Image (cartoon, helix red, strand yellow):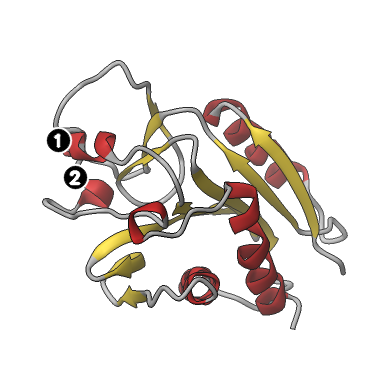
Amino acid sequence: MQTLIRNLGSQDYLSVWQQMLQFTQTRTHETADELWVVEHPAVYTFGLNGKPEHLLQKTDIPVVNSDRGGQITYHATGQLVVYTLLDINRLQLNIRQLVTLLEQTMITALAQYGITANAKKNAPGVYVDDKKIGSIGLRVKKNGCYHGLSLNNNMDLSPFNNINTCGFEGLEVTSLQNLNININTHELAIPVLHALLTAIEK
């Protein structure tokens, strides 16, 4: 079954989350998987087990308590977000395998720009020289997963200083722009989607 790709442009986090939830709750075994490509205006999001103390300083950036896994992170324009609305039973994947697949997707895409990235066993996501460049957060209902990955492209990283990113004190972040790769976010989506589709449609 072919995976559908939807380019949502720039959309509010809360509304896209509600659309994902509705899609997942109403999907059937015959529903095609979808990948949603989006950028969000500035927002902090907590995962289900997010601890309030990881928000170090309150700002005028809105805070949303989400239903994904993980702790707190930050989204903003210039960050590529790909939401993975997948039937994990049909793909014969468990959550750990899916996390690994998404990590490898970002590592493969970054390699096309000459960036060497890696995953860490006990800290999901993708890192360049121990700085986090890509994050993963997922939720499963009715054998369907939603939420997905985010990859820092050309965004202002300073709001990450107000949080313990993903619950890790002192964790630094980076972006493609910081690594001297200057591309539009919709361009970055192309190798990410290609790597992801190659993995899930094999």
Q: Amino acid at mark 1?
A: Glu
Q: Is residue 98 left or right of residue 46?
A: right
Secondary structure at numbered mark 1: helix
Quarter in which the C terminus is drawn: bottom right
The answer to which of 28 and 70 lies nearer the viewer is: 70
The answer to whether marks 2 and 1 mark residues whose Cβ atoms lie closer than 8 Å is: yes
Residue marked by disc 1: 53
Residue 143: image location, x then y, percent: 65, 61
Mark 2 or mark 1: whose residue is earlier in sequence: 1
Residue at left offset 37%, top offset 43%: 47
Q: Is residue 113 left or right of residue 31?
A: left
The answer to which of 151 and 180 lies nearer the viewer is: 180
**Numbered label attached to residue 123:** none
Residue 54: image location, x then y, percent: 18, 39
Secondary structure at numbered mark 2: loop
Quarter in which the N terminus is drawn: bottom right
